[in-house]
Image (cartoon, grey):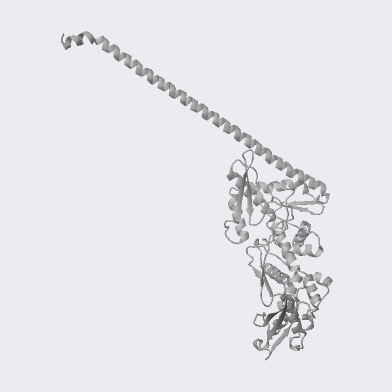
Amino acid sequence: MSNSALQEKFLQPEDVECDLCDFGTESEKNEERRDREKDEKDRERSERADSRCAKEADAKAKALQETKHENQTRKDHNQKHAATFREDRPDRGEPGANANGANVSALTDSIDAIDNPIGLLQNLVARHLCRPVVKGDVEYAFEQLDSGSFVASVSVAALEPIAGYPELKKASAKKSAAREALVYFEQFEHFQDLEKVAISKQRTGKAGGLDEVQEMARRKEPNNKIHSTQSTESTVHREVSNGDNREKQNQRSHHSAGHVGHSIGHSIGQPIGQPIGHSAKVLKAKGASGEASFLEPEDAKGKRQTASRSEKKAKVSKAQVKIFQKLGVSVANPVGVLNEKIAAIVRRQVTQDDISYSFETVGQQFTCTVSVDLESLGIGQEVLQASSEPVANKREAKILAADALLSSDVSDFQLPRNQQTHLEPVEAVEAVEAEAMSLLYEIVQLLLRRDPTEDDIIYTVEELEEGFVATVKIPIMQRLPACQGEVAATRTEAKTLAAEAALLSIREA
């Protein structure tokens, strides 16, 4: 059988058409199955996305509700303290006193309307420091709560951190902290009367406070009135006594149109938005120029202008008096008196070449010889010398040598009677003991709103042959350079002279 006959027998046309139909039906079924699987996957993906979005929305709603609850709790806390304050202080019940909370809220609302509180805070700090803000001047820290919200705190210079309200995002929390800092500095951006308050506190032995500074402000204003700008300024003060943990809270608000007045205070209680960790009084005043300035009493300024540094009495501490009484010297602080006499004669500061001290060892003791070359000073042709007896240490030997030279018959070195320094009893010395260091400590304490540490007031003492020289540096006062005092006989006296130099620089700033 031929091939054509076989093909005609086994490959009929109807069979070919049937096979093609079956193939087309199978392809359509596969395509439909793939479409169904794709639709199912898309539907599952969409359901998972919807479920995830719903969970996120529920979490955000829950966090927002918790944040609102926390904010409301703190607002209720502030209002409770304000109500307690008004009940405890009926003497402050002048007209408008009940509007204290409303005025504080008005001040806060005006700050909340600012779009860029972070930039405004930097501008405020730069204006206060009189230079651009650098890294470390304004620092932010964040803390995440259990609810997922963020709380930011801002630290300005060496001041305590100021915290904002909880927010869902870090950026919002940062703005909240900046706004709270602006509210804080709106109330306490004043430095003018710091030194007056510190001096008053030191003289009277009282804690001083808001009432004292407000009285200063009322005396400065005509008709004893305190005005404010079109914005509201609130005055709040809190003082905590360490002895009996007694709290005194004073709050006063003023809202009227006029020129800039004085507003001083601290926050009631310890709510968010106020410094963390310390409760201390803050007394500040803003000068007319907007820059920090420190004023001194008129009587103190007059005395400072009429007195010469070379004519000041040598400052004597209790420890020095005991040493001088033990050695039996004729005058208090012989080394300082000798320097003072030489400086008064040559009318300049004494140098190492003017008065020289040499030491010798005698067994386990020391002797000192002091020499004054009158020829190099241009007041004579000889060299004056005096030696001490053997004593336990070089300092006592130096004191005895200077006293021996002062006790010798050198009439040319006698100063007027009002410039001589005589030995006084310990009780009389207490009145002149380290007043400058104490006053400087009070000023820094008021600036920092806490007790200063060694890092806040840095004293550096250098020992020279003629005595000691101290330098004091205060980091919080960045515009104040390191201040160096004059040569002194002891380290304590050198620190006191350095503190006096710092106070003088502060007053002249």
Vertical comparison of 200 with 339: above or below:
above
Q: Could you say which is closer to the camera, residue 418 or residue 200?
A: 418
Vertical comparison of 507 with 18: above or below:
below
Count of numbered marks: 0
**x 81%, y 63%: residue:** 204
Residue 399, horizontal then vertical, whole percent: 74, 78
**Visible residue check, residue 311:** no
**x 77%, y 88%: residue:** 409
Q: Could you say which is closer to the camera, residue 70 or residue 358?
A: 358
Vertical comparison of 495 with 148: above or below:
below
- Residue most toward the left? 2
> Which quarter of the figure is the N terminus placed in?
top left
**Visible residue check, residue 141:** yes
Q: Is residue 280 left or right of residue 40?
A: right
Q: Quadrant of residue 506?
A: bottom right
**x 78%, y 49%: residue:** 97
Q: Could you say which is closer to the camera, residue 231 or residue 338?
A: 338
Residue 86, horizontal then vertical, whole percent: 80, 47
Q: Could you say which is closer to the camera, residue 509 or residue 497?
A: 497
- Residue most toward the front? 363
> Which quarter of the figure is the C terminus placed in?
bottom right
Q: Is residue 256 left or right of residue 52?
A: right
Residue 128, horizontal then vertical, whole percent: 63, 59
Residue 271, horizontal then vertical, whole percent: 71, 46
